[in-house]
Amino acid sequence: MLVLHHAPRTRSVRVRWLLLELGVPHELRRVDFVPPKEGFFSQATPLGKIPVVEEDGAVFCESGAILEYILERHGEGRLAPAVGSPARGPFLQWMHWAEGTLSQPLSVLLWHRIYKGDAEALPSVIDEATTRAHRSLDFLAEGLGDGPWILGRDFSAADIMLGFTLAAAQVLGALGEGHPTLVAYLGRMQERPAFQQAAAD
Ligand SMILES: N[C@@H](CCC(=O)N[C@@H](CS)C(=O)NCC(=O)O)C(=O)O
């Protein structure tokens, strides 16, 4: 059975959320998140980061890769456009963009505001990260359009990737009144029972 190493309010929420949406049986191994002040790869999981998944002897990390793997292995065609279909490109774009682009300036804000607590001494770093986050959110709002989901009518794993990052953006103060359609989009995700369960675990 698939094992998920999970800590609340971390990227493992994405994995738990997808597993619940798909109804895939799994074992949840809870770990305590340790704020990485004194080094990276220090979490109590097999690879030192959260999330990590184990199945049939494979042990691997990276939430986006884990979601793609789960879709391939357990998805039965659900929550992702078919490989080679026209919607597949945008689907992969948003799957990777959530972590590869939007998360980057948010990580700077998280690092200096929460982990190191030195944001007040670094106004230009914080301003630049905030501007980069806002530009990325503009790009996402444009891509979302009227939605309701990022690929239009159908909810997909790309929404799960984006949902965790948007929630982080809201907590960090980067997502707010300037992006009302994204706030509403996040609200739609938060209404889903699988999200509520994953966020509560
Ligand atoms: N890009 C990775 C990021 C993994 C990551 O940095 N996870 C955080 C928790 S959300 C973590 O383990 N931080 C602690 C550390 O870096 O030691 C992913 O999407 O899984």
Image (cartoon, rainbow, N blue to C red):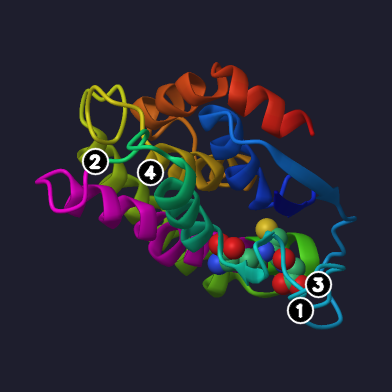
**Observer-nearest of 128 and 18:** 18
What secondary structure is marked by label 4?
Answer: helix
Instruction: Calculate the distance from the C-alpha at mark 1 to the C-alpha at mark 2.
Output: 33 Å
- The residues colored magenta run 82-109
Residue 164 shown in magenta: no
- Residue 81: image tag: 2
Instruction: Calculate the distance from the C-alpha at mark 3 to the C-alpha at mark 1.
Output: 8 Å
Tell me if mark 1 has few (under 14), some (14-19) or many (20+) residues whose alpha carbon lies within 10 angstroms of its own.
Answer: few
Between circles 3 and 4, the one closer to the viewer is 4
Name the residue type under label 4.
Answer: Ala
- Tell me which label, 2 or 4, sits earlier in the chain: 2
Reading the image, the residue beneath label 1 is 41
What secondary structure is marked by label 1?
Answer: loop
The overriding secondary structure of the stretch rendered in magenta is helix
Instruction: Calculate the distance from the C-alpha at mark 3 to the C-alpha at mark 2.
Output: 36 Å
Name the residue type under label 3.
Answer: Pro
- Residue shown at the point (26%, 48%) measured from the top left: 91
Name the residue type under label 2.
Answer: Pro
- Tell me which label, 3 or 4, sits earlier in the chain: 3
Instruction: Calculate the distance from the C-alpha at mark 4 to the C-alpha at mark 1.
Output: 26 Å
